[in-house]
Amino acid sequence: MHVKHPQETACFISRRQSGTVSIPGSRMHSCFIDAKLTALSLFAVLLVSVASAQSPKEVFTGPRGAFITCGKAVLPGAVDGKALRAYRVERREKGSPWEILAEVAGPTSFEDLNARLLREYDYFPQLKTIKINVAMLWERLKASRELRSAGMLSQVLPIQLVLGVRWLDTTVQKGKTYEYRVSTIDEDGKVVQSETKIPVTYPREIPVPSLRVLSTFADESSAGIHWLAGPGVPPSTFSVYRRFGISGPFKELSPNFTDSCCVVAMGISRRHDSTVFILVDHTIEPGQVYQYYATATDFFQNPGAPSDTTTIVTFNMAAVPLPEFLTAESDDTSGIRLSWRLRDTSAVHGIIIERGPALDSGFVELYTAGPTDTTFLDITVEPATMYYYRFRLVGPGNKRSGPSAVIFGLFNETTPPAPPTGLTATPVRGGVRLSWDVDSTQNLEGCIIYRANGLVSSMRQISPMLPPDASSYVDTSTGLRGKYTYFYSMVAVNTSHVQGPPSDTVSAVPLIPVPVSSPMGVRTVVLEDGIFITWNGQRGEDPELDGFRVYRKTGTSDKWKPLTDTLLEAWQNSFRDTTVIAGNTYSYAVRAYSIRMDSSALSMTATARVPTPEIFPPANPRARFMKKRVYITWDEIVQPAAAGFRLYRYTRGRKPVLVATLSPDDTEYVDRRPGKTSPVFYFITTVDRAGHESKRSKEMPLVIR
């Protein structure tokens, strides 16, 4: 058979099918159409890219041994004008001398070439699928003893071994490290050129990507599978194993192109960064269950992990009649009721109902009915919304049919919805916040809020249609007043625009300021037991007035303090302050409060001073000197305002010195240090609770001896 030029694709798909190989996003069925498959090289599909990535200095290993690259010339032959006989391959372990393993040369006759190819068939059975024109290949080798003269076949591993440009060392031992040297030798056995390879430990483990199922297809005459290679260097070949049913041993499938009705076709395709492994199996029987798995191998026959097992049923669902007499009607209280009839249920395992938002897109699975079912109630619909439905049949092996005709339905709900629950009203600044429970159990279009401006007023709508997931609303209408109580209720509206009964009624007073005037005419009168404060009554002018609070500050202080914790009644316009202290000056102001507890500004200030009662020094003060001490006595006093005494001492020309501060119950004192200056004078003063001091008592002169 003619071998394609290297620029031609190596995929086994026929020319009529080229470009239809399935990768993610393409239609798989087109590559499984019955056609005469051209048996090109399974090996050569990806080997151009794989082989070109290999370095001649690297040694690769496989199950049979180590593969050593010899060169690009097919020897014996002339290289750069010099006749060369063969490649000499030597090997050594670390610390050992070089050992000659072989002298490698290519075929020297047509018979030799043909015999070598036949020997490789035992190790590479897939090579039999390539109908190589051996005579043409020999003619090319005679014209040019270069590897490239073999065209695309030059990239196939068994062809490289046949031509002697690569050699297999089958004597390697597991776990040992080897170093190889390849030399070209002339007719006399002399070395012309040598190259030492990179040391390699056998086996050299390079992970082979595993395969995963990309897509499958099956009908009554064929089964097809696409596997996608995982990341890494793309595998070069693959093997497929099949078994009948779901138990028993697997058997390897061999490509077969000799009988068009019983073809097993295997191939590899690469597009962009995806590598797809393809199987088309025409050796199946209709209506049966088959299981497949695949194992990929790299360029040197190293196997990867087996793929997952794929189950295929050879059955064509297109031959089963789809459901007919399809209807979709509204069920008033529940949803949309679908009905259908199935002509033949013998091959049907289930009926898939799909629903979508449009006539030709967006369909998703909704429910799988039994083969004998004829109705289904869709309760997941919303009223006044159009829904579209179609059906698929499920047969043996979970095979699915194409979609049926599309029908549509509309759910109209006439039952009024239940009223909202959990409604509460909370005063907030500027209005009232309403909160309620979100209702996700009914098909609601939303809710509407109503308000009444008093117990005798009727409810009126104050909100637009609120969304069904809303849970609060703030009423800040311009007509709200902080002195009134407002009543609220809600109704729910379903998606069929049916309005339900009102909810419970709640009430609240909005947090809106209610102004009141500042009190006028504040006056004070000093009485025996305190200070009496009055102001003008204003309940008639301010009906929103709730009460008053009186504030006081002492002396020059600028800090006002309330005199009571609670408000005075709105009808009161006076207050008696009994906590004053004689001798102090007090200032008073009054603040008015509304029913919302909004306060006015402080009133004008009224000031009053509590007079101090006159106090007198003690009578009959007496002093006598004895034993370096001065003994002073005085009469007891009866003065309620008195808080104590102060005893002073002085000498002529000097200021009086405070000797002692005494309690009002004291009537005597002993001055133990009167000094030596003579004469000395003593006097006593009385002090009240405010710290005011009386005049001096009669002076008591003494001569100190």
Image: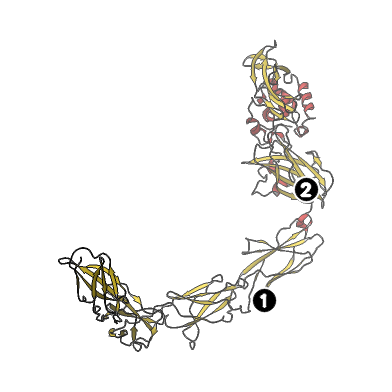
Relative to residue 421, is residue 661 drawn left or right? left
Q: CA distance from mark 1 to mark 2?
A: 50 Å
Between discs 1 and 2, the one toward the N terminus: 2
The colour scheme of the drawn protein is secondary structure
Given the current orientation, which residue lies at the most extreme left position? 653
Residue 150, given in percent of the width and then of the height, sits at 68, 26
155, 291: nearer the viewer? 291
Dot 2 falls on a residue whose secondary structure is loop
State the image coordinates of residue 313 (x, y, percent, origin top left).
Answer: 79, 52
Figure quadrant of residue 651: bottom left
Give the residue at x 67% y 65%. Answer: 389
Circle 2 residues within 10 Å: few <14, some 14–19, many ≥20: many
**Element under disc 1:** loop
Along the horizontal axis of the image, is 502 left or right of 599? right
Residue 333, numbered label: 1
**On-image quarter of the C terminus:** bottom left
In this rendered view, identify the residue nearer to me: 156 or 108.
Answer: 156
Q: Nearer the viewer, residue 701 or 581?
A: 701
